[in-house]
Structures are given as structure tokens and as C-alpha cells.
Image: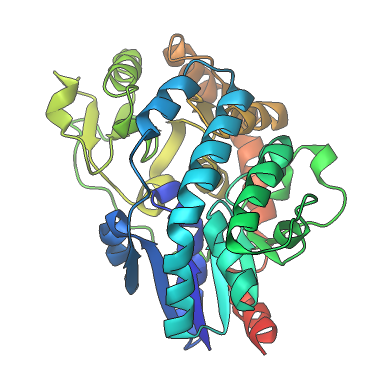
Amino acid sequence: MRVLISTRSGAGHFGPLIPFAHALLRDNAEVLVTAPASASAMVADAGLDHHPIPDPPTDGRQEVFAKALTLGDDDANALVVGELFIRKDAPAAYPHLRRAIDAWEPDVLLYDISDFAAGLAAEAAGVPAVSVSITLGTHMRVLGDVIAEALDEVRADIGLEPDPELRKLTEIPSFTLLPKALEPPEELTGAQPLRFRVPEPQEPRPLPDWWSNNEWPLVYLTFGSVAPTTPFFPDVYREAMDELATLPVRVLLTIGRERDPAELGPIPPNVHVARWVPQADVMPHASAMVCHGGSGTVNAGLAAGVPMAVVPLFADQPHNAQRVAEIGAGIAMEGVEGLADAVRSLLADDSYRDTAARVAGELARLPTVDTATTILRELAA
């Protein structure tokens, strides 16, 4: 079986696809990842073959993001998804994805649900497809009308029939690694994605001896892979680091491959700054996490039973922060002010860890991603 995996750049987009790709390789499938050229290092780090396509157009991009920063969360998301992800990026990527499909002849296409060009290319080429949800159902529902309107414009340009109800997008199989507990109750009606979990490593690797006091609890501080490339860096990072410097904790701060730790200025003695550390290596050692609320990061924390303080910055992060707080697995913040008190509460109040552990137990009962390969084989057949 040949499986073409398609994704946008960014760990938040590609990360949820990696466990499925590795499961397919274990099942002796042929796997090829089509992604923008700028994702080459990310794909290589995952041990996968990369078919690069051109990066998304840059003209007008910064202006859209700048405008988005002046809007409320849902309006900002609608602007970025509608104007950039669909109207600008999808038409640019579509012909390259069609050529990749025609040349490689995959039996099935597995794609990040926000990679709209991939869904359109699979439909036009008549290739069975499965989407991988990278956000909660709430986020997609809020943006449904915006997505349908923008997609129909693109569909008309490439000769596909209109799809105002998004049936082509929502009626194909969908996989997710997100736990059911994180979804709002109103999203648990109707068709549901198939939920899977990532197999746990046999033995977690120890972290290097970065701190002078290894008896203190470890707090993992991360704002994901996109925030370091935005105006949030370095100020938000510096403020968060200074808040946590006042606590008797060890802090591991990751800032992404494109930034230099020196940009943060003086580093407190209880903080270690790294560009990138695999989350699977960090979570087994963490007592608490401070994060931006990206779906992949939240899921990794919950899967390990780690309570979290969530400082949402953009995209679906406010929805995730709200749900983490509503289920009692952490604290939703409106900024980094007061972060020290929030982390102190996470470490002192066992209810946060107990709830996170309960969600971890729910995830542990899900089938592993290896089960998904059977579904893909049946679909391909």
C-alpha cells in the first residue's frame, strides 16, 4: 500500500501525522510526505521521505497576520484561515499536489485537515482520503461558514462542484489523537472522528543534567513552533521565564529551531533554554507545564497526566485553554502576569494532576495508531 501524507509547515500541523506515518511504516506500507520545502528538516527529523512543494506565497502574508492581531480570537482565525490557508495557499499548492498524486499514484491520501489543497486534490484525482484533525471540533464548527465560502471560490476555479455544506470535507473518515474529554459536550453529537493514541515508549530517556538542583519539580515551558517567529518573541518568553524564576522549580524552556537563546538576555539559574527537545522525552519528567494551548502540546501533556497553565496566543488556543480549565486539568491564563501563582497552585492542588491523570487513563484505553493502518488498507482496497 502506498500512502501519500500531506501537511502544511509547522509542528502543530505535521506533528499529529507523524505517529500514523510511523505506524504505516511498521505495517510495511510505502510512505511519502508532501509538504512545503521549508518543512524539510522537520520531515527528515521524523525519519520520513519528503516530496517538497513550493512554500506558500509570501506576498501580503505579514499584513494579514498583522491585521489578525488587532481582532478578536474567532475573527482573527476566520481571517487567517479564509484569506491565507484557503484563498491564497490552497490554489498555490493544488497543482503541485495533483502532480505528486499523478506521479506517485498513492492508494490513499492522509492529510492535515487544514491542508485544504490536499483534500481538493484527492477529490479531483479520485483517491480515497482520510483527514487528521489537529484541533477540537469547536474550532472547525466556528469557522465552518468561512471555510465553506472560501473553499467554494477555489473549487469553482479548479472545476469542482460547489460544496456549501462541506460534505466533501466532513463525510470522509477522520482520525484524531485528541481525547474525548477535551471536546465540549455539544461537539459529541453526530459523526465523530476515530480516536487513537500514540504507543508509550518502553523507557523514557533521562533529561541531561542541566540544573544544579535536580530535586526541584520540573516545569516545562513552551509556546510551540510558530510563536517564536512572531512578535510574541522574545517579550512573552522573557516575562514567563522571569515569573517562574521566583519559584523553587526547574524550568525547561524551548524556543524553536529558528531562535537563539541569547536573544532572551540573562537566563535565571533555575532555567535551561533549548531550541528543541522532543516532548516525549520531557513529559514523563514534568510536574507541570506552561504552554500556549496548541492542540498537540495540550494532548501530549494530558496523555502524560501533566497539569498545565495555558497562556493562549492565537488560533485555536483560546478554545483549548477554556476546555483545559473547564475539565479541571489546568488553569486558563489571560497573559503571563500571575503565572508564578498559577504554577504554584498546579503543584500544590492535587485535583489538577488527578484530573489530568484521569484523562491520561482515558487516552490509554484508546486503540493505538497501529490500528489505523487496517482502516487505511480497507479504504485503499
Question: Is 347 on the left or on the right of 50, as rendered?
Answer: right
Report the front residue among 284 and 186: 186
Q: Residue at x 28, y 61 (%)?
A: 40
Residue 228 image point, x, y percent: 31, 32
Does residue 143 sit above or below 156 in this rendering? Answer: above
Report the front residue among 64 and 296: 64
> Is residue 217 at least partly visible in the picture?
no
Residue 171 image point, x, y percent: 77, 63
Dividing the picture into quadrants, the one containing residue 140 is top right
Does residue 284 sit above or below 226 in this rendering? Answer: below
Query: How was this image coloured?
Result: rainbow
Dividing the picture into quadrants, the one containing residue 363 is bottom right
Report the front residue among 38 and 11: 38
Question: Is 295 on the left or on the right of 95, as rendered?
Answer: right
Which part of the image, by quadrant, shows the C terminus?
Answer: bottom right
Residue 56 image point, x, y percent: 37, 49
Tally the marks: 0
Q: Residue at x 52, y 69 (%)?
A: 20
Does residue 99 sit above or below 212 in this rendering? Answer: below
Q: Residue furthest right?
A: 189
Does residue 267 sit above or below 359 in this rendering? Answer: above
> Is residue 165 at least partly visible in the picture?
yes
Q: Residue at x 32, y 14 (%)?
A: 239
